[in-house]
Image (cartoon, grey):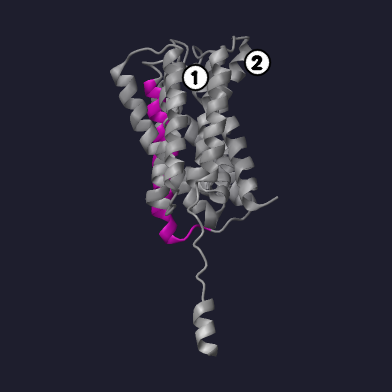
Amino acid sequence: MNRTTNGWLSGFAGVLIFSASLPATRLAVQGMHGFDPLFLTVARATIAGLLGLLLLVAFREARPARRDVAPLVVVALGVVVGFPLLTALALRHITSAHAVVFIGLLPMSTAIFGVIRGGERPRPAFWLFAALGSAAVVAFAMRNGVSASPLGDALMVAAIVVCGLGYAEGARLSRQLGGWQVISWALVLSLPVMVPLAVWARPASFAQIGVAAWGGLAYVSLFSMLIGFVFWYRGLALGGIASVGQLQLLQPFFGLLLSALLLGERIPPSMIVVTTVVVGCVALGRRFAKPPAPRATTVLSSSAGSRS
């Protein structure tokens, strides 16, 4: 199996894991029996950070170089703190279905930061298919009903921006540190802030917290915050940030499929049509993600001249 294919398979696994993140987050913060969004953010980072620390110690990983500390802080601010907190706050004002509108823009954000921070240069055709895929996801989400909340929308826009930056920065670091090491070190760097905040923001009583909220916290702590990133950053590093990042276009549909399988929800026919369009855009985007190889210069004429 070549490097690119390996990267796409790892990225696909990461997307599958992330697909349940928004529904799990909504379960965790919904209603009077849910967690406060701030506590959910710092608690998931604390739990995942302690697990990441155990992994680093168990495998005797060397500390990152000084030049890698600042990028790791950017990763932590983007995916450990920024995206979880902003989405948790947004999901108190909008539904997870409405959030799909913005998740459909995450691949574009990741690709843009892949160009800025990762030095990638996709062909113009890539941007065309990336835009078409994003538009298809947004159109599907809007057609299937959304709720209006300017505050929730603004929070989701901010979440998409910081998450795209965190994905691109983490993928760049993964090329030298490794995927699970990047997210583990980012989580560990956040622990000195997350642990005190978790103690400070904890509920007055855990007795009122429902089972669904605990399940949501467990999922986003273990899978969304740690295991998913192990696959995701490895996929981005091996297959390319802009290219593999387009797999996120499939995330909303995986989420709906999980809802159908687990909750018995109906899959609308339009979902099958739009999913087909998105898969086509992802495949074509992959083809044009890398710039064309430079043509070899021909020196036959000069060689012939030197012989004469």
Which residue in the rendered view is the most extreme toward the right? 1
Secondary element type, mark 2: helix
Disc number lying in front (1 or 2): 2
Instruction: Please provide percent x and percent y for residue 28.
Output: 49, 19
The image quadrant of residue 76 is top left
User: Which residue lies under the disc numbered 2?
Assistant: 261
Mark 2 crowd level (few <14, some 14–19, many ≥20, 10 Å Cα): few
Q: Position of residue 230 (x, y in %)?
A: 58, 42
Q: Is residue 198 visible?
A: no
Badge 1: few (under 14), some or many (20 or more) residues near its Cα, within 10 Å? Answer: many
- Asked whether 126 falls inside the magenta stretch, the response is no
Q: Quick one: 79 or 212, which is closer to the camera? A: 79
Mark 1–mark 2 Cα distance, whole angstroms, equals 21 Å
What residue would you read off at disc 1? 28
Q: Residue 220: which numbered mark, if any?
A: none
Task: Say whether marks 1 and 2 touch (CB < 8 Å).
Answer: no
Residue 208 in the image: above or below residue 54: above
Magenta-highlighted residues: 63-90
Q: Residue at x 50, y 63 (%)?
A: 295
SS type, badge 1: helix
Check the image and name the residue furthest to the bottom: 308
